[in-house]
Amino acid sequence: MDNMKLVELVAPRELAVREVKVPEPGHGEVLVKIKACAVCTLERRLFTGETKIAYPLVFGHEVSGEVVQVAAGVLSDLEPGEPVVLDLLNRCGECPYCRTGRSNQCVNKFDPGLPVLGGMAQYIARPARQVFRIDPRVGFLRAALTEPLSDCVHSLMRTHLSPQMRVLVIGAGTMGLLHLAIVKHYGMFCAVTDMHAAKLEVAASLGADVTIDISAGDPRDALRDEAGLEGVDVVIVTAPGKEAVEEAFELAGTLGTIVLFSANPEGIMIELNPNSIHYKEITITGSESRTEKDFYQAVSLQNAGDMHLDPLVSAVFPIDDAQRALESSLDPALYRVVVAMDETAVEEFEAIGGV
Ligand SMILES: [Zn+2]
Ligand SMILES: [Zn+2]
């Protein structure tokens, strides 16, 4: 087999592009030529050193590509040349959570015996169960957003979402706007809050029914004035910090569900009034990662063709510029930064008007 390039994290804030042999797919595995790998919060934390791991590491888990080779033992009908997305989360299939359909909490997901991440490379070989066919019309750039979309599917499923519900998303970053895209796909009401007008404009362009600038006053007044609502049925907190959680408590209506989607810095504590939970029957839950079912559903949403995710890609860098890609991704004003493994994703970005 030929050689390929991959990106290694060799020390905090230091990436190296290396040449290695293209992996041979083992029994039951599919070899995929990666086209695009988006940079997620996990990669940013690993890059800065905020999250520590053994070096060197090939990170990257928001991946789209093309099937190159289907090894013996693959049961699905994947064919070379087909566009696919990869779900690079390890699930052991043996722990109590995996065995009860809640594999997002797999106790062995970071087991050193299993391959971790690996998306920042030109090729990857993984078991066919981690490889999902996606409609070619989605395009590789948008397809790379399937993994974060699947995390948002998981989050919304924590709320027992139902058509009459009204949803409010706190934070108009990538994860907030992916929640918005799903809610609007379902044809439901969705409000979005943020403190940056530019991000709220993007939310409006993606179909937000109401956008609320929390730096401009009490969001409860804005929700009442603009939507005639005293509270909403579902609040998704995609912004970190004490204020965002407190805002969720204020905006959740009777029988409302609050999902704490984003992680918080260590040490954040909140006070809550137990009577507001009691009388209004509020549910508070978290959301972590995704199951294979969530991933499958995210692929279905992508294939539906109405997700309009183009504004969520802010920049595309070729693999040789991975160092610059990771440095740029630390800018909070940007949505996803993508590393292109060949010219395909660069051309797709130009075609949607990106520079
Ligand atoms: Zn991700
Ligand atoms: Zn498990």
Image: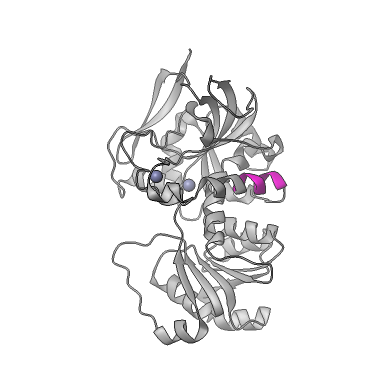
Q: Seen in the image, is 11 located left or right of residue 327? A: left
The residue lying furthest to the top in this view is 1
**Magenta segment:** 298-304
Q: Position of residue 346 (x, y in %)?
A: 60, 33
Q: Residue at x 38, y 33 (%)?
A: 115
Q: Residue at x 30, y 62 (%)?
A: 266
Q: Position of residue 123 (x, y in %)?
A: 49, 25
Dividing the image into 4 quarters, which one contains the C terminus? top right
Q: Residue at x 72, y 63 (%)?
A: 187
User: Magenta region's main secondary structure?
Assistant: helix
Q: Position of residue 283 (x, y in %)?
A: 48, 73
User: What sort of colour scheme is used for the picture?
Assistant: one colour
Answer with the quarter of the image where residue 264 lies: bottom left
Say if 246 sits above or below 316 in the image.
below
Say if 167 sits above or below 278 in the image.
above
* Residue 241 painted magenta: no
In the foreground, 236 or 274: 274
In the foreground, 287 or 168: 287
In the foreground, 288 or 270: 288
Q: Position of residue 49 (x, y in %)?
A: 30, 46
In the foreground, 329 or 53: 53
Q: How many marks?
A: 0
Answer with the quarter of the image where residue 54 lies: top left
Whether residue 335 can be seen here:
no
Figure quarter occupied by ligand 2: top left
Q: Seen in the image, is 18 located left or right of residue 283? A: left
Whether residue 31 can be seen here:
yes
